[in-house]
Image (spheres, rainbow, N blue to C red):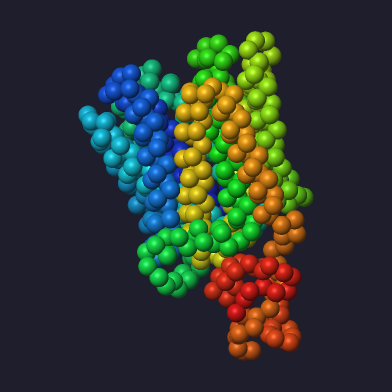
């Protein structure tokens, strides 16, 4: 898997991603301590609002960035986002009002909503070979999982030497280093931007409309919801399970979260080889159905009120959640790359970023509020039902026969159009086969063999 790091451009971009993630992790810890200093017992409310603002920024800003990203140099956009995040981190230690925290968090996460989809859209151009790109997706998944384990440990070590305000300085330095690495990477020239008509709303929703136009991407929307149900259960209720349900110490909460990360990393390491033999559809749908099975097991753990077996069972369940989520999330970039034209990748990745976080915006409060109001078992049942319904919907939406190359008929193109090179003349038009994506020449997905709705 490490062979992709021989590519200098990808090596620099990956290092930028890792350093920025570590900086973000440090900021998360410092922000919690800052909230406690400012709000005391109400710190949880402040953090909850900050997380909601984060999700709203992701949902609203990413599509807007997607609308203009292909009109801006990608390096400039990513460096600008990093410098914005560094500036916000610089100001955070000096705030003294809760509303100031909310404003700075919105700016910080808005910059992240600009950086991440652009970064994701660049990687397929840097690594055009599918084998290399698959390895890069696994590396990215590993980076996110390692960050969730490494950043809190690093923050804990640093806090023995410095006050938490200095963690924001580490965050700022991380974003500056990320910007420098992006500047040093030689990026390939992007595909020419597709001409677009319509207003700002039309441009901002272009990526979302691509998702609804392609069956496998419609299935991805459902899979995002299944993953959000599981990740919300882990993120929101881990501390409740460990401390209240199992009666264990606070020091064991990181072990539960670590089990989730370990399961995700194990699958991320295995997937490049698995995807050489199995289709994205087989891996991702099995991951979604595994989530449902884990929810059933978690229901049994939740229903039991005694027994030493519950702690190791919870660790296994969390590891299985991580593995199943990784089965769905890791191949996502491959799915988008083969479904949209190169010039629309940034819009499509921005739509994926926005739509997936819309799912989390639903499941995070559901996991917390339902668990607090009706108990953990009610939360497990509700979120498990969401995961099951989403998995079954994805199975229905994603055709079993889903080739990249689709035979289709053009009925209104001039015979000398370059696109028809190699096409066969048939009654009513021109028939040919190639990798099918939704674009101006192919405005919708075929509903029957050889009858693609192309012009």
**In terms of image quadrants, where is residue 35?**
top left
Residue displayed at 40% across by 65% down: 71
Residue 225 percent across, percent down from the top left:
57, 43
Using the rendered view, name the quadrant where residue 165 is placed. Answer: top left
Q: Quadrant of the N terminus?
A: top right
Q: Can residue 443 be seen in this view?
A: yes
Q: In this view, does 134 lie above or below 34?
A: below
Q: Which residue is drawn at 40% across and 23% down?
A: 158
Residue 289 location, x and y as percent?
70, 40
Where 117 falls versus 311 (above or below)?
below
> In the visual, does 166 lie left or right of 361?
left
Please name whichever residue, 44 or 11, is drawn nearer the observer in this view of the structure.
Answer: 44
x%, y% of residue 132?
A: 64, 53
Residue 325: x %, y % from top left: 62, 38
**Left or right: 40 in relation to 368:** left
Q: Residue furthest right?
A: 277
């Amino acid at each position: 898997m490490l062979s992709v790091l021989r590519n200098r451009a990808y090596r620099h971009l990956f290092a930028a991603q890792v350093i920025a993630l570590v900086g973000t992790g440090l900021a998360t810890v410092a922000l919690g301590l800052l909230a406690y200093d400012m709000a005391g017992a109400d710190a949880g409310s402040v953090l909850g609002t900050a997380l909601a603002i984060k999700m709203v920024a992701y949902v609203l800003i990413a599509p807007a960035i997607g609308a203009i990203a292909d009109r801006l140099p990608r390096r400039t956009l990513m460096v600008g986002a990093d410098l914005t995040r560094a500036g916000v981190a610089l100001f955070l230690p000096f705030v003294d009002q809760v509303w100031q925290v909310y404003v700075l968090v919105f700016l910080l996460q808005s910059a992240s909503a600009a950086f991440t989809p652009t970064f994701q859209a660049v990687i397929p151009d840097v690594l055009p070979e599918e084998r290399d790109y698959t390895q890069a997706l696994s590396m990215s998944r590993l980076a996110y999982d390692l960050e969730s384990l490494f950043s809190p440990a690093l923050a804990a070590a640093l806090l023995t030497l410095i006050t938490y305000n200095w963690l924001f300085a580490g965050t700022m330095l991380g974003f500056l280093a990320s910007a420098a690495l992006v500047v040093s990477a030689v990026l390939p020239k992007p595909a020419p931007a597709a001409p677009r008509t319509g207003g700002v709303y039309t441009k901002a929703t272009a990526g979302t409309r691509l998702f609804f136009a392609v069956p496998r991407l419609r299935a991805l929307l459902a899979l995002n919801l299944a993953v959000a149900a599981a990740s919300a259960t882990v993120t929101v209720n881990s501390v409740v399970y460990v401390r209240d349900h199992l009666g264990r110490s606070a020091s064991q909460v990181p072990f539960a979260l670590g089990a989730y990360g370990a399961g995700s990393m194990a699958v991320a390491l295995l997937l490049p080889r698995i995807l050489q033999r199995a289709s994205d559809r087989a891996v991702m749908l099995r991951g979604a159905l595994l989530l449902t099975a884990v929810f059933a097991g978690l229901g049994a753990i939740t229903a039991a009120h005694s027994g030493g077996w519950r702690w190791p069972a919870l660790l296994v369940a969390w590891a299985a959640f991580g593995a199943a989520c990784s089965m769905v999330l890791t191949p996502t970039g491959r799915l988008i790359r083969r479904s949209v034209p190169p010039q629309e990748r940034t819009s499509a990745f921005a739509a994926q970023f926005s739509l997936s976080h819309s799912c989390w915006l639903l499941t995070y409060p559901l996991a917390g509020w339902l668990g607090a109001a009706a108990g953990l078992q009610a939360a497990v049942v509700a979120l498990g039902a969401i995961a099951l319904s989403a998995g079954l919907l994805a199975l229905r939406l994603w055709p079993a026969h889903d080739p990249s190359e689709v035979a289709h008929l053009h009925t209104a193109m001039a015979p000398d159009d370059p696109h028809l090179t190699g096409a066969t003349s048939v009654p009513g038009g021109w028939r040919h086969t190639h990798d099918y994506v939704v674009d101006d020449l192919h405005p919708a997905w075929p509903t029957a063999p050889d009858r693609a709705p192309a012009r």
